[in-house]
Image (spheres, rainbow, N blue to C red):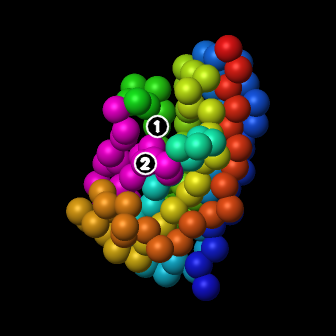
Amino acid sequence: QVRLVESGGGSVQSGGSLRLSCAASGLAYSRYCMGWFRQAPGKAREEVAVGDNYNGPRYADSVKGRFTMSRDSAKNILYLQMNSLRPEDTAMYYCAASRRSGAFCYSRQTYEYWGQGTQVTVSS
């Protein structure tokens, strides 16, 4: 059974930083998709960063240069380092995973496993 558990959310002021973590268990594959998505109140869930452990991540234009996704494959932990946070980054952040890999990682429909989410709030 696949389980994803996020942590690291919180409240920060504009310009601050946070690092989200996602501990994954039950994914017994050497290569698989993982990513971060977010959903603000009243808005659709959107992609933040997606990729697999062989190819570099793809970032949403709104976070390029500010967010960095990385993975500790030995520990099965996915990270999202968020710098220069803005009020518009306020959302529930979700970790997601899929047994697929490669180009499939760049399609949201690929992701069949989701965490419970962690809230990020950025004040101005």
Left or right of 13: which side holds 22?
left
Stretch of the chain drawn in magenta: 44-61
Q: The residue tagged with tag 1: helix, strand or loop?
A: strand
Looking at the rendered structure, the kind of residue marked 1 is: Thr
Label 1: which residue? 68
Label 2 element class? strand
Quarter of the image with the N terminus is bottom right
* Outermost residue, front side: 42
| Mark 1 Cα shell of 10 Å, populated few (<14), some (14-19), many (≥20) | some
Q: Where's residue 116, x and y in %?
A: 68, 62
| Residue 124 showing in the rendered view | yes
Say which quarter of the image contains residue 48.
Answer: top left
In this rendered view, identify the residue nearer to me: 28 or 51. Answer: 51
Could you tell me which residue is drawn at 46 percent across and 55 percent down? Answer: 35
Q: Are marks 1 and 2 in contact (CB under 8 Å)?
A: no
The vertical placement of 110 against 121, above or below, is below
Q: Amino acid at mark 2?
A: Glu
Q: Residue tagged by mark 2? A: 47
Specify whether residue 70 is in view: no
Q: Is residue 117 above or below residue 75?
A: above
